[in-house]
Every structure is written in structure tokens, then in C-alpha cells.
């Protein structure tokens, strides 16, 4: 694919990225200084140093070096000099957040380098003739070219994954539509499915033209179309916009004895606007297939939306078996469940198990250990299977950046942090739009991409409408599923996205976020439960929160949500379960806070009452007798909690047939 100036799309992408990074980083510094600092790191590794000529070739021609380490040495220096976006993880979380961000950036630059390395070099420019007059030029192109023969392919299809899982339902949907938009979260296998479909119909002789476009930018699409225009129509590659327009005109249906059959795959479209004016025309002889992490109406309106979902349990266990795992099916199914049935995660976990000679049980134990980071339970970036550009831990960083730039800018990231603490299977809308949630969004709003020099606006309170829009932004990038029509479980988020979001946070930041999430649940919990489905959803979210951050809800004391969820269980008629809850709560409070802490006494009071409700009035009275003595000793005879204990003791004595003054 040829871009302006004769560069292929891959080399142009590397060139443009370096130019943008240099512009950001070299403020008060020079390129010579950057090269000198990079050479220090290279010398320490006994690698050849950089020259200004070498760097100029990267910047102007996108010429890749044979060793990615040399390019990365320079990029690291420039990234260190680039002013960071404030507010992403807080000062306390900068180290861990920075490590995750650096891993994602390294994967991004390695992808650029790989694409440039796999792209053809610019054709040499012949020296002008000096002894003969110049050849006459065609009026519409630079030089005559030999027309291509059909079938003809432009662009390189990604290699088929080693253990590719065909999904027949998706294949049928692609067969039945002339324009399909293949959507889904990062890591579900959209690109592999699109490549398999293209490869299948190409190998079966059903195409005259196959065009594969890595469509991450608008310019990449134009460059690919221009290459097609050059190949098919002798269009001038020096004018890519015109060449691209000529190609789109060629695709238009025309009367003729032998219309050409074509397929255009636009892989990994990042913005709907990138395809404005570049959608291939509707044709009975042509098909268009788009893959994207987005689900904007502007994209789906052009064709059949096809959502790529996670693996089923059967697909996941089949994949793991093919990857060389010989454990029983129930163990493989449990591992798949722990990884959320995400194809990318299964692929990388299988590779990690092979590299480390671990069994599924040991790996699951390590994965469940919240003290371990997900990044440390996956292969190193250089050892990823199937030429994958990034680990699962870094797979969604770019999607989050895009979501955070959507209106209202700067709210998607803190909103995703909040959802990461709650139930992945469903969070009520009212929790994420409660007053504590709005306060959290206001305080942690990150810098607007539109006006980074002004920093985030933390003075204007975030509104309920803006919180709702932040959820829609995350939904559009497939980072969450937001279905307002099911308000009790309006927001679902994949468990590995939760893990990837929480991993970079420091213990302090994690604890603060957990207490905030607990506040949102308490605020959304109605005093009188009339909606049993809502109560069940709130209890499930409390359980998820205690799993994510069990210690945080006890610092500095027991959070109110721990008591509220126990009362909710009892109010729902599950008395035995409520007794078990408060037994555990009272024991934990005694261990963590001490026997005389007010929260310990409160938990004992709730437990005593539930014993009476369960029919043990004598046991309840005895428990309140002991509690009353402790309340008098710790709180005083006139304290409200002491008076409550005295009143409850009298009540259960009467219920047990033993009235009298306590």
C-alpha cells in the first residue's frame, strides 16, 4: 500500500507516530540530546548506537531498524520527556500505573515497527535522463504500469491463530450480508474471524479482488485505496486522495459482461469519522467487512451489526485441550470461567502454563490471589502467541483512552474504576449515578483532550446526566455493556477488565476506591425494600466488593454497607442466611476492631434479634442480657445503643414468657 511520498501504509504510520511524539517531547530540548540519551542505554546493552541519519530515516521514511530495541530506546526517552496527563492514577499510584501504561505503549510501538518492517520499501527513484528527452507522461498518472491480472490481493492477512476456533453462526451471518460490522470487546477474536472469512472465500475462488486494510487511521484507509487505484487503474500514487477516489468509483456497479467480485476488509476501525466518504459502495458483486471495538450508530447504520461474544464453555475447553492441556474437562471449564471465557486470555494463559510447566489448579490459585498482578501471570510481551501485539493486561488501554475523550471528556476512566469494584454480572444504574458516585467522578475527572493545558475541571459538580453519558462512552468502546432497559443489572463489565483497571492502583488508592464504591451502594439502597430484584442486585454487588477489597471495608471501621446487606437478607425472609451473615460479621469485628468497638456491639445486637425472629426468644434474651452489660460498661447507661439493648431485652423476655425489668 502506497502513501503520499511513496511510503507504504505501515511505514507512513511509523513516520507519523514519530513525528507526533517528537513534537510533544522536544520542548526546550533537541533531537540530538534525545539521541545521545538513547545511546547511553544502547551502549549499556552492547548494541549499535543511533546516528542522526538513522533517526531521520525513521522519521521521514518510516524505515524500520532490524532490532526493535534500538527504536524503543529512543521512544522511551521521548516518552519520558512528554508531559504526562494528570489525574490518571494519582500520585500514589504513579509507579504501578506508569508500568502498565509503559507496557501498553511498548506493545503499541512494537506493532508500528512490525507493520513497517513487513511493508515494502519505497521504490527507488530513477535518475533523470541527461542525454535523451523525457518520456511523454500520461495525463493522469506518473508512468504507465502493466495492468494487474485477476484474482488480485492487496494487503497482508494476519496469520491464522495456531488453534483458531471457527464459529459457524458468525460465518453464516457474514455470508448472508453484503456489509457487516463485526464488533466486540478487545480480545474476542474479531480480526481472526474476519481474516478466516476472507481467506475462506478467496481460497474457494469466489473473489477477483481482496483488499485487507489495517484501518486504525483514516490515512491508512486512504493509502490502501490509493494502492488499489494504482494497481487497478494506473492512478498516480503521488496523489493518494485522487487515487483512492478513482478506486471507489471503480467499485461502483456498472453494466458489463464480467463484473469483478470483491471483498474489502477494514480491520480495527477506531473512529466512525475515519470512514466518512470512504465506505465502499453497495454492490451485488462486492462485500465490505468492518471490525471495530466501537458500537456507534454511525458505524452500525452502514451494515449488519454482528457482535462477537466470548467463547462458550465448550469452545473454551476445546481450545485449551487443543493447546495441550490434559486436565479433566471440569478443571479446564473452571479455568475458562476464571478467565471470563475471553479468547485472548485463554490463548495467553495456555502459553504461560506451557512456558512455566504449571497445572491449571496452581495457576487458578495464583490468579485468585489479589496480591498478584495479572501482568505477572501472562507471557512476557516478546513471548506472546500468534504474534499478538499486547498482553490481556494492556489490551484495553487504547479503548479506554478513546472512551475518556468522548463527551463528557475525562469521566470514562473514573467511571470504569468504580465499576471495577462491583459485580461484573450487573450493577444498577442508581448505584453509578448516586451522590457518592457523582462526587467521585467530580474529584477524579481527568484532563480533557480538547483542552489539556487547563487541566481537569474539579470545581463544577458532575451531574447525573453526565454520569449516564460516561457509561454510554464506555459502552460505545465495548468496555462495558450498558443496558438501561434492565435497570437492576444495567452495567456489566468483564472480570479481566476489572482486574486490569485495579492492578495499577496502590493499596491506598484501592482502599479509597472501595470505600467510595461502598458509599454508592449504601446511597442507592432504599430504606424500605419493595423491589426484591433490586435488593438482590445490591447484595450481589456488596459481595463482589468484599471480594475485591475485603480489608478496605474495615478501615477505619466497619462500613455501613456490611450491616445493610445483612438486614436486607433478613428482610427478604432468609433468616438463617442473615444469622450466618451477622455471626461472621460479629466475629470479624471482634477480631479486627476489638470486642468493645461500637461496630462489634452493633453486630451482636443484630445477631441477637435474628435469633429471636428465628424462634429462639430465650436465646435472643440471653444474648441481649450479655450485650446490655457490655454496653453499660463501654458506652454508659444512658447511651442510645444501651437503651436500645435494654428495650430489646425486655421485648424478647416478654416473647419468651419471662417479662420483668431488665
Image (cartoon, rainbow, N blue to C red):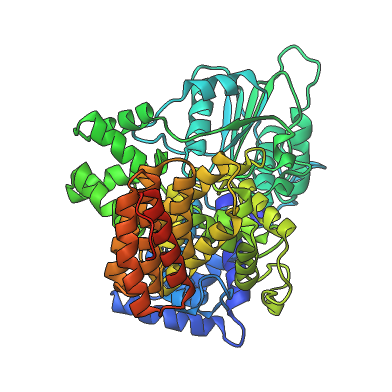
Give the percent coordinates (x, y) of residue 109.
48, 60
Tell me if residue 657 comes above or below residue 549 in the rendering. Answer: above
What residue lies at 60% left-to-right and 52% top-to-bottom? 526
- In terms of depth relative to the viewer, which is nearer, 186 or 475? 475
- Left or right: 83 with respect to 374? right
Give the percent coordinates (x, y) of residue 336.
34, 38
- Left or right: 246 with respect to 1? right
Tell me if residue 214 comes above or below residue 283 in the rendering. Answer: below
Can residue 500 be seen here? Answer: yes
Q: Residue furthest top?
A: 257
Q: Quadrant of the C terminus?
A: bottom left
Total numbered badges shown on the rendered structure: 0
What residue lies at 49% left-to-right and 73% top-to-bottom? 640
Q: Quadrant of the N terminus?
A: top right
Quadrant of the rendered image containing residue 604: bottom left
Give the percent coordinates (x, y) of residue 50.
43, 75
Give the percent coordinates (x, y) of residue 191.
51, 38
What residue lies at 34% left-to-right and 43% top-to-bottom? 338
Can residue 383 be seen here? Answer: no
Quadrant of the rendered image containing residue 250: top right
- Left or right: 552 with respect to 252? left
Quadrant of the rendered image containing residue 506: bottom left
Tell me if residue 657 comes above or below residue 246 in the rendering. Answer: below
- In terms of depth relative to the viewer, which is nearer, 87 or 318? 87
- Left or right: 301 with respect to 605? right
Amino acid at each position: 500500500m502506497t502513501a503520499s511520498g511513496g511510503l507504504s501504509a505501515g511505514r507512513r504510520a511509523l513516520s507519523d507516530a514519530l513525528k507526533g511524539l517528537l513534537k510533544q517531547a522536544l520542548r526546550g530540548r533537541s533531537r540530538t540530546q534525545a539521541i545521545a540519551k538513547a545511546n547511553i542505554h544502547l551502549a549499556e546493552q552492547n548494541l549499535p548506537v543511533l546516528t542522526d541519519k538513522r533517526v531521520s530515516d525513521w522519521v521521514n521514511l518510516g524505515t524500520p531498524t532490524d532490532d526493535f530495541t534500538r527504536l524503543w530506546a529512543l521512544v522511551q526517552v521521548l516518552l519520558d520527556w512528554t508531559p504526562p496527563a494528570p489525574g490518571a492514577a494519582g500520585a500514589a499510584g504513579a509507579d504501578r500505573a506508569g508500568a502498565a501504561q509503559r507496557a501498553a505503549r511498548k506493545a503499541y510501538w512494537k506493532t508500528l515497527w512490525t507493520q513497517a518492517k513487513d511493508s515494502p520499501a519505497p521504490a527507488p527513484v530513477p535518475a533523470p535522463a541527461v542525454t535523451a528527452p523525457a518520456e511523454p507522461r500520461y495525463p493522469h498518472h506518473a508512468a504507465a504500469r502493466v495492468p494487474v491480472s485477476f484474482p488480485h490481493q492487496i494487503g497482508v492477512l494476519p496469520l491464522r491463530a495456531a488453534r483458531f476456533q471457527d464459529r459457524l453462526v458468525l460465518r453464516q451471518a457474514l455470508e448472508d450480508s453484503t456489509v457487516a460490522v463485526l464488533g466486540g470487546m478487545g480480545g474476542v477474536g474479531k480480526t481472526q474471524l474476519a481474516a478466516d472469512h476472507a481467506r475462506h472465500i478467496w481460497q474457494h475462488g469466489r473473489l477477483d479482488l481482496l483488499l485487507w486494510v489495517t484501518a486504525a487511521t483514516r490515512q491508512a484507509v486512504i493509502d490502501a485505496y490509493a494502492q488499489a487505484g494504482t494497481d487497478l487503474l494506473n492512478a498516480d500514487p503521488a496523489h493518494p486522495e485522487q487515487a483512492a477516489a478513482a478506486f471507489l468509483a471503480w467499485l461502483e456497479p456498472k453494466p458489463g459482461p464480467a463484473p469483478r467480485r470483491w471483498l474489502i476488509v477494514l480491520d480495527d476501525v477506531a473512529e466512525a469519522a475515519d470512514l466518512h466518504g470512504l465506505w465502499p459502495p453497495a454492490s451485488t458483486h462486492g462485500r465490505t467487512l468492518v471490525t471495530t471495538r466501537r458500537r456507534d450508530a454511525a458505524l452500525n447504520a452502514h451494515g449488519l451489526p454482528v457482535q462477537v461474544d466470548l467463547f462458550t464453555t465448550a469452545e473454551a475447553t476445546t481450545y485449551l485441550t487443543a493447546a495441550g492441556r490434559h486436565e479433566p474437562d471440569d478443571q479446564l471449564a473452571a479455568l475458562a470461567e476464571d478467565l471470563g471465557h475471553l479468547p485472548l486470555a485463554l490463548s495467553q494463559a495456555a502459553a504461560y502454563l506451557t512456558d512455566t510447566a504449571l497445572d491449571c489448579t496452581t495457576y487458578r490459585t495464583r490468579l485468585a490471589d489479589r496480591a498478584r498482578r495479572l501482568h505477572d501471570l501472562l507471557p512476557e510481551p516478546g513471548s506472546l502467541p500468534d504474534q499478538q501485539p499486547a498482553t490481556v493486561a494492556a489490551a484495553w488501554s487504547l479503548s479506554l483512552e478513546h472512551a475518556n475523550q468522548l463527551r463528557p471528556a475525562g469521566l470514562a476512566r473514573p467511571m470504569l474504576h468504580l465499576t471495577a469494584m462491583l459485580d461484573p454480572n450487573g450493577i444498577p444504574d442508581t448505584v453509578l449515578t448516586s451522590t457518592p458516585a457523582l462526587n467521585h467522578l467530580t474529584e477524579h475527572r481527568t484532563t480533557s483532550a480538547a483542552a489539556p493545558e487547563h487541566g481537569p475541571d474539579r470545581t463544577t459538580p458532575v451531574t447525573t446526566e453526565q454520569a449516564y453519558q460516561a457509561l454510554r462512552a464506555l459502552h460505545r468502546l465495548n468496555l462495558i455493556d450498558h443496558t438501561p432497559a434492565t435497570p437492576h443489572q444495567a452495567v456489566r463489565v468483564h472480570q479481566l477488565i476489572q482486574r486490569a483497571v485495579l492492578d495499577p492502583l496502590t493499596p491506598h488508592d484501592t482502599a479509597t476506591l472501595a470505600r467510595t464504591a461502598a458509599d454508592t451502594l449504601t446511597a442507592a439502597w432504599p430504606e424500605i425494600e419493595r423491589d426484591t430484584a433490586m435488593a438482590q442486585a445490591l447484595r450481589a454487588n456488596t459481595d463482589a466488593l468484599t471480594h475485591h477489597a475485603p480489608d478496605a471495608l474495615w478501615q477505619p471501621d466497619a462500613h455501613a454497607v456490611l450491616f445493610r446487606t445483612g438486614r436486607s437478607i433478613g428482610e427478604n425472609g432468609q433468616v438463617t442466611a442473615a444469622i450466618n451473615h451477622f455471626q461472621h460479621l460479629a466475629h470479624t469485628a471482634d477480631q479486627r476492631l476489638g470486642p468493645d468497638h461500637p461496630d462489634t456491639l452493633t453486630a451482636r445486637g443484630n445477631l441477637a434479634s435474628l435469633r429471636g425472629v428465628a424462634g429462639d426468644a430465650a436465646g435472643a434474651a440471653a444474648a441481649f442480657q450479655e450485650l446490655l452489660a457490655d454496653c453499660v460498661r463501654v458506652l454508659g447507661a444512658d447511651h442510645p445503643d444501651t437503651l436500645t439493648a435494654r428495650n430489646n431485652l425486655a421485648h424478647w423476655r416478654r416473647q419468651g414468657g419471662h417479662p420483668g425489668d431488665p
